[in-house]
Image (spheres, helix red, strand yellow):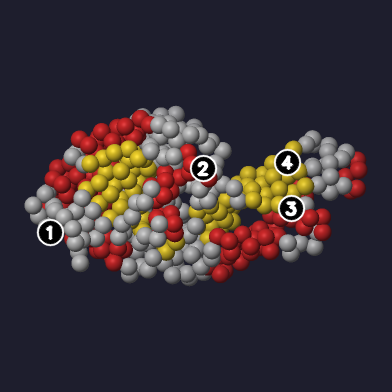
Amino acid sequence: MLSEVTPQQVSEAIDKRADEARGWLMDAIAFESVQGNEAEIQAYMLELLKSLGFDAEYREISDDIFDDPEYSHNEDEMSYKGRPNIVATTKGTGGGRSLILQAHVDVVPGADWVDAFEPKFEDGYVIGRGAMDDKGQVIMQTLAMAVLQDLGVELKGDVEQQVVIEEEVGGNGALSLIRQGCTADGVIVGEGSSLNVYPANRGALWFQAKTTGTPMHMGRRHEGQNAIEKMVEVIAHMQDYEKKIIAESANYPLFEHYAAPVQLCLGIIRAEGWPSMVAGECYMEGGIGFLPNKTMPQVKEELWAEIMKTEDEWLRDHFEIKYDKLHNDSYEIPGDHPLAVTFNDSVKEYHPGSEIFGWNVSCDARLYNRVAGLPTLVFGAADIQQAHSGGEKVSMAELLDGARGLALGIARWCNGE
């Protein structure tokens, strides 16, 4: 058994399993694992992990999670019966630092991409829904652990590989494992980072807004209150708030890469009625991105205050806003935290351009940091622009380099002082 491993040994071990890993990924993509349809991919992953010699098991999710204050509600909620997470545990010899590796198997629908779940390998890329988000990261983590086992590396710290569901609707699979007591000295959440190391994420808060007017015939329009027109003013105030949070977040540490790392997005608007009738109600949904310089309650308070600056008394009395859906907090650990430095140094052995900075996207990472209180970072292959896209793909060369860096980093982290 080895207590230490060299970059060259890791690289050669990855090469030996490269074709096999590509096959695992293509197998995984073929499962249409949208929300509610994760059972088959989880059965595949459980069998794969067991076949590699890992102590893997299902972790059931209780429907009691619906009542958890951190639960992310969505329009397609359903029972979790038959829809488990997976945990594969590698016990260390003791005296080292423990680690959680986490990635998700649920994907967004293929939409207009008719062969989204028919994986292809072309010009060095694996193509298909989930290639990057997030089955490629699941396979990268599996490959990294497999080669450490192949090399006979003896880890001092425990490693827990988690394969979860429902990241795409807010992280309910991860939340379940956290409530079940998972813990470690560090957490790596697999998402596309272009092999950079992200020790901070921006938050995302979805809102549902409503304005109420007085419906009446268009011939008497000026005697009524039009809910659509009221929402137009709400939008103007929301855009003023966006300018404010962008200005207040400029050059925030770890997010200096981005000209506008925060944003307010208007995604859905609708009104019920008739073309020749003053609208009685108008609904709008959207999201707000924010950095760790603001808390989620603070964002809610500030947005409300900005809208209430209106001089329209009717609007002040006939406007409401709720936050019943996705509510991902921001999080950060220092860029020089040992977890970030250890893995960035390890990745640089194979990908010298790797950097440490914040991610202007939100994912499960914030739950491990904010709810579980664990040092957490995001790491993976391919750029976030591939996520949810038609023709989603991942470079196998990049995925293999990521697995090399991950395997070396795991050995250094778990066996470090």
Mark 4 surroundings within 10 Å by alpha-carbon count, few (fewer than 14), some (14 through 19), many (20 or more): some
Earlier in the chain: of badge 4 and badge 1, it is 1
Mark 3 surroundings within 10 Å by alpha-carbon count, few (fewer than 14), some (14 through 19), many (20 or more): some
**What amino acid is at disc 3?**
Phe
SS class, disc 4: strand
Earlier in the chain: of badge 1 and badge 2, it is 1
**352 sits to left or right of 246:** left
* Residue under label 4: 271
Q: Are marks 3 and 4 in contact (CB under 8 Å)?
A: no
* Residue under label 2: 66
* Residue under label 3: 319
Earlier in the chain: of badge 4 and badge 2, it is 2
- The residue under the point 61% across, 59% down is 300
Q: Where does the image place residue 134, in percent across and percent down from the top left? A: 37, 43
**What amino acid is at disc 1?**
Glu
- Between disc 2 and disc 3, the foreground one is 2
Q: Quadrant of residue 346?
A: bottom left
**What amino acid is at disc 4?**
Ala
In the picture shown, does residue 193 fall above or below 48? below
Q: Are marks 2 and 3 in contact (CB under 8 Å)?
A: no
Q: CA distance from mark 3 to mark 4?
A: 14 Å
**What amino acid is at disc 2?**
Phe
Residue 371 visible: yes
Earlier in the chain: of badge 3 and badge 1, it is 1
* Residue under label 1: 4
**158 sits to left or right of 248:** left
